[in-house]
Image (cartoon, rainbow, N blue to C red):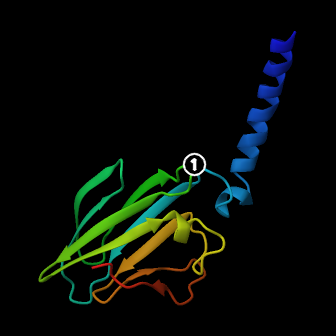
Amino acid sequence: MAFSRNHNIIFMLIPFLIILATTSFASAGLLPFSSKHVVIINKLVTRQTLIVHCKNKGEDKGVITIGPGDSFDFRFRVNLRKTTVYTCTFTWPGNVATFDIFRADRDDNPKSKVGVCSECIWSIYEPAPCRDRRDGGQPNCFPWAS
């Protein structure tokens, strides 16, 4: 009898969780395992080819070559503890720079100054990486880590 009752609760809980995950709670970064899409666009003013190598603790996205104006993207889910970080090394002639292209504390936190992004679009310029805003406003630019 107890198994039957637990079984019914599980079947009622699954649709509820699916609905919850597809509502504004998920896009606001309030749920664990939120889906993210990072897009990196080569906007080097010098029109040089950009070589990008992104990875986190458990996943290496490989070395990618991005031509002028072209882009590279990848998808993932934020971990339960919301500590997900993807660090990228950017190389172009005469330069090597690193930057955390995704940090859960910055990009999946409604209290951060730049807010939550489900599609995190980054324009890479020589002086700084900039996260574009969906509303077309001034992008948020950050200093290179190195």
- Looking at the image, which residue is at 56% across and 52% down? 81
The kind of residue tagged 1 is Leu
Q: Using the image, determine if residue 114 lies above or below residue 28.
A: below
Q: Using the image, determine if residue 106 lies above or below residue 19.
A: below
> Which residue ends up furthest to the left in the rendered image?
94
> Which residue ends up furthest to the top in the rendered image?
1
Residue marked by disc 1: 80
Residue 132 image point, x, y percent? 49, 79
Task: Locate the C terminus by quadrant.
Answer: bottom left
Nearer to the camera, 47 or 89: 89
Residue 113 image point, x, y percent? 59, 81
Q: Secondary structure at mark 1?
A: loop
Q: Using the image, determine if residue 137 lies above or below residue 78.
A: below
- Looking at the image, which residue is at 26% across and 89% down? 45
- Looking at the image, residue 29 sits to the left or right of residue 17; the answer is left
- Looking at the image, residue 129 sits to the left or right of residue 131; the answer is left
Nearer to the camera, 71 or 107: 107
- Looking at the image, which residue is at 69% across and 49% down? 21
